[in-house]
Image (spheres, rainbow, N blue to C red):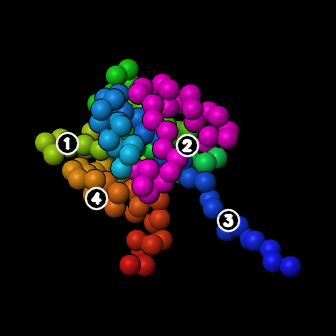
Amino acid sequence: MLRLVRPKVSMATILLVDENPLRASLRQSILQRAVPDVVRVSEPAEALCLVESVEFARALRLVITGNHLTGLTGPEFVSELRARMPRVPVLVLIGRDEKPAKDSGKESNEAGVSYSYAASPEELRATVDSLLNPTARQTA
């Protein structure tokens, strides 16, 4: 008898925090080529509420945000998120004319936080891939 064996697929979720609907939609479609489950929220408070859900937190593999957010500042949001989810990497997308933000003297190279200009879709996908698959990056 022939048995079909399904390969184990690890469910991975990317959380995209972006208040600009057009930019968020574009980034979401770019990211869904790498990981089909991209959840977009428009405010940091929404993101923090989502990570409180055990099921959501279990599947969360990456958070992508910008430096400028309404409500909390980018650095405040990143600090709060890292306090709640210290093992989930955070990618902060910044403009070419920006420098990584510093929060109250903390270094911008905080463990688990990466900054990227990601000017093109290819750069964004490559950056996300390197964060989701760190061992592939080390062996290449």
Q: Check residue 85 for magenta coloring.
A: no
- Percent across and percent down for residue 124 are 31, 54
Q: Nearer the viewer, residue 3 or 122?
A: 3
Residue 3 visible in rendering: yes
Question: Upstream in the sequence, badge 2 or badge 3?
Answer: 3
Mark 2 to mark 1 CA distance (whole Å): 25 Å
Q: Given the current orientation, which residue lies at the most extreme left position?
A: 97
What amino acid type should be assigned to the residue bearing mark 2?
Met
Q: Which residue is tagged 1?
A: 95
Q: Report the quarter where the C terminus lies.
A: bottom left
Question: Badges 4 and 2: C-beta atoms under 8 Å apart?
Answer: no
Q: Which residue is tagged 2?
A: 85
Q: Which residue is tagged 3?
A: 8
Total numbered circles = 4
Q: Which residue is tagged 4?
A: 122
What amino acid type should be assigned to the residue bearing mark 4?
Glu
User: Please, is residue 31 above or below residue 7 in the view?
Assistant: above
The local secondary structure at tag 4 comes to helix
**Residue placed at 68% from the left, 39% from the top?**
54
- Badge 2: few (under 14), some or many (20 or more) residues near its Cα, within 10 Å? some
Mark in front: 4 vs 2: 4
What amino acid type should be assigned to the residue bearing mark 3?
Lys
Question: Upstream in the sequence, badge 4 or badge 2?
Answer: 2
- Percent across and percent down for residue 132 are 47, 59
- Percent across and percent down for residue 87 are 54, 51
Mark 2 to mark 3 CA distance (whole Å): 25 Å
Q: Magenta stretch: give its range.
A: 31-57
**Residue placed at 25% from the left, 43% from the top?**
94
- Percent across and percent down for residue 31 are 40, 50
